[in-house]
Amino acid sequence: MNAKHLTSLLIQNYRSLDGLAIDRLGSVNLIVGPNNIGKSSLLEAILLWGTKRHFLTIRDILRSRDECNVDFPDQFQTAPYFGLHHLFSGFPELSGLTPPIAISTLDGEQTVSLVLSDASRDTATLAPGPLVTFDLYNDPKRPYGLLIGGALEFARNGETQFIHYLEHKCLYLSPNVSDVAQVPASKLWEQVEIAGRETAVIDSMRLIENGIEKVFFIGSKPRIPVCRIKGRERPVPLHGMGDGVSRLFELTLGIVNVASGICLIDEFENGLHWSVQEQVWDAVFQTAKNLNVQIFATTHSLDTVKAFQTVALRQTDESFGGIVQMRKQNGKTAAKPIFGEDIRKVLQHEVEVR
């Protein structure tokens, strides 16, 4: 792993995760636990860390949960509802006294924070220097803003709305098949072609459809992925080939675009039949090794855990792949990393994944 990877994690005051500490992480990490334990929130926190809490990452996270009804960064004039309080533990009434969100390694050397600070302006302003003050309510009676380190880029068109994910090499893959990421699939495919990594993506798709020879995009806004299939004259739309092929395309497409970075996969099993999951994990582990990608995936499926276990235990380095088991402890969410032979015990004790 490298400096862009997490060897440990501490999350403070983010949604339901306050004081969550994970003292060991591998290159491929499978996150398990019951519903509403905070698995997706954990992925969001890592996305914030990986993109250096870029303003557009915050917006995208809020939008994904319908917590923001504003088309930022263009609308500031009508006291928009931005929903920042949803990000802070306990959904507090935000003020300069609200404890900050902090996401870091356990040694605290790589910390990303969201800090509320007193603000005198009633509109969003780009402060001189490296800090940005954003007023939450456009209301002089509640003059509190979000202080974000680093320049705020007011991206006003589709070409720049997602560039920060690729620049920071940190990408989140949605559980919704055909909705791969914040970055359009056509743009990701362009990057794959430039890097000459098409074979890795197509090989993964062949786990389900062995006749795929080529993938390309047609049309414009949106561009549509199609496949050339051996023995067929006309290309076939990718999304007409079933959820499994689409999911494999999207998973591999995301991973190969973040070489030496981080890929976050929510609900890994979506669209994948249990019978191919071991092969898929094999491909994921191999791609992670080849391209030095750190992977965090969540699941609700025991089949996924079993397949992961089989592949993880085949690795010569037992620290390469591990399970992060989330659970409630003394009323708070806690997480236990599990590696090596201890992974076998997860299934023996019937770990709760739903």
Image (cartoon, rainbow, N blue to C red):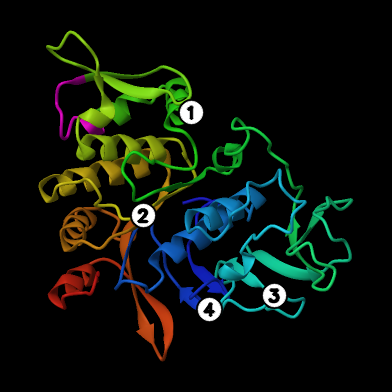
The one nearer the camera, 184 or 108, is: 184
Q: Amino acid at mark 1?
A: Lys
Quarter of the image holding residue 199?
top left
Q: Position of residue 170 (x, y in %)?
A: 51, 46
Q: Amino acid at mark 2?
A: Asp
Secondary structure at numbered mark 3: loop
| Numbered mark located on residue 187 in the image | 1
The numbered mark, 1 or 2, whose residue comes first in the sequence reads 1
Q: Seen in the image, is 282 located left or right of residue 120?
A: left
Q: Position of residue 278 (x, y in %)?
A: 16, 49
- State whether the magenta stretch is mostly helix, strand or loop: loop
| Real-space CA distance between mark 3 and mark 2, rounded to the nearest whole angstrom | 29 Å
| Real-space CA distance between mark 4 and mark 3, rounded to the nearest whole angstrom | 17 Å
Q: Amino acid at mark 3?
A: Leu
Looking at the image, residue 135 lies above or below residue 11: above
Looking at the image, residue 212 lies above or below residue 53: above
The numbered mark, 1 or 3, whose residue comes first in the sequence reads 3
| Numbered mark located on residue 266 in the image | 2
Q: Seen in the image, is 120 located left or right of residue 100?
A: right
| Numbered mark located on residue 18 in the image | 4
| Real-space CA distance between mark 2 and mark 4, rounded to the nearest whole angstrom | 21 Å
Q: What residue occupies the far top of the structure in this picture? A: 233
Quarter of the image holding residue 332?
bottom left
Q: Amino acid at mark 4?
A: Asp
Magenta stretch in the rendered image: 204-212
| Real-space CA distance between mark 1 and mark 3, rounded to the nearest whole angstrom | 37 Å
What residue sits right under mark 3 in the picture?
94
